[in-house]
Image (cartoon, rainbow, N blue to C red):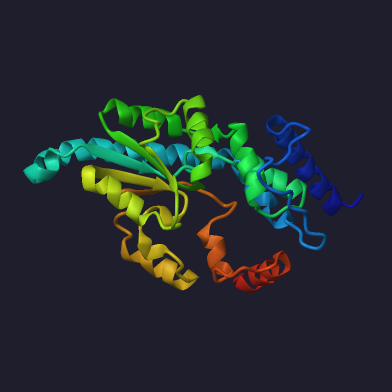
């Protein structure tokens, strides 16, 4: 066996071990949806390094702890500066807004399942994974949420999971220890994918101290459906807010950073692969 083939085989073996911890041998989609057949041509191997980074890299854990440690500092600074706020703002109850997937819950086993079975993202498998309620907490997330809650801060979990996933999502969040989880505080997608209106509902009743997410769309509508260059520009425009009110969690597995490479088009896996190659910057 060549060195290249040995490394690939070893990587898939590691993913297989991780996969077996989460998925039973008879893992199936829910009865509400049809099975999606894997592509016979496309390869999802490009995602392998990203999933292994989330599951096996201590650096990933360190970045998560760093984000939530910084979140504590944001709360402390807010309390120190509260007296400087206008009385109308000072008296408003405080809130923190979390995204859910890859911000407080780790879905890397579902990504691993897709790689091993050569199945791109599809709703039947996604719903099935959610119904299992086996997502673990992102490192540091539960501890930070409990800390914020102990300070009297309301916690809201705003996600683009579909509304039909609400019960399973609430159960999973409670199972791993998150506080302030309820029908009121877990706000999923009902119609539009933009989270702006849902964030505004929270902001109309609370003073939002911080937002946590793994996707720029978790913070502001200014990033939605923007090109790579525009996303860079919008990010640079508010560079002073990162680490102050907006705190980003690492997610190399998927997100609008990748969708921007595809120009937000519905493409085949082969077309996506071509776009990724063309997007590479060379010496």
Residue at the far right in the pictured view: 1
The residue sitting at 72% across, 56% down in the picture is: 44
The residue sitting at 9% across, 44% down in the picture is: 88
Query: How many tags in the picture?
Result: 0
In the rendered image, which quarter contains the C terminus? bottom right
> In terms of image quadrants, where is residue 16?
top right
- Left or right for 245, reference 60: left
- Left or right for 138, reference 55: left
Front-lying residue, 57 or 195: 195
- Left or right for 221, reference 271: left
79 w.r.t. 34: above or below: above
The residue sitting at 53% across, 67% down in the picture is: 260
150 w.r.t. 237: above or below: above
Q: Position of residue 129 (x, y in %)?
A: 63, 39
Q: Position of residue 141 (x, y in %)?
A: 44, 34
The residue sitting at 45% across, 50% down in the picture is: 190
- Left or right for 22, reference 60: right
> In terms of image quadrants, where is residue 220?
bottom left
Q: Position of residue 147 (x, y in %)?
A: 34, 28
For the question of whether residue 282 can be seen, the reply is no
């Amino acid at each position: 066996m060549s060195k290249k083939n040995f490394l690939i085989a070893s990587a898939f073996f590691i993913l297989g071990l991780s996969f077996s911890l989460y998925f039973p041998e008879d893992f199936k989609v829910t009865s509400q949806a049809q099975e999606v057949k894997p592509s016979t041509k496309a390869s999802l191997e490009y995602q392998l390094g990203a999933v292994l980074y989330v599951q096996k890299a201590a650096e990933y854990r360190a970045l998560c702890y760093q984000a939530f440690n910084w979140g504590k500092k944001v709360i402390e600074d807010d309390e120190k500066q509260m007296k400087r706020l206008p009385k109308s703002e000072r008296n408003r109850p405080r809130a923190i807004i979390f995204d859910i997937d890859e911000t407080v819950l780790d879905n890397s086993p579902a990504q691993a399942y897709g790689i091993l079975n050569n199945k791109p993202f599809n709703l039947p498998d996604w719903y099935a994974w959610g119904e299992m309620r086996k997502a673990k907490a992102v490192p540091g997330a539960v501890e930070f949420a409990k800390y914020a809650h102990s300070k009297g801060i309301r916690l809201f979990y705003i996600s683009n999971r579909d509304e039909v996933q609400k019960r399973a999502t609430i159960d999973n969040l409670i199972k791993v220890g998150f506080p302030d989880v309820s029908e009121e505080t877990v706000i999923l997608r009902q119609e539009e994918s933009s989270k702006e209106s849902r964030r505004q509902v929270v902001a109309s009743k609370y003073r939002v101290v911080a937002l946590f997410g793994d996707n720029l769309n978790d913070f502001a509508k200014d990033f939605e459906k923007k090109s790579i260059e525009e996303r860079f520009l919008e990010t640079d425009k508010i560079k002073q807010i990162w680490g102050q009110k907006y705190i980003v969690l690492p997610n190399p597995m998927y997100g609008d950073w990748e969708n921007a490479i595809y120009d937000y088009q519905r493409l085949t896996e082969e077309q996506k692969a071509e776009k990724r190659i063309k997007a590479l910057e060379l010496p």
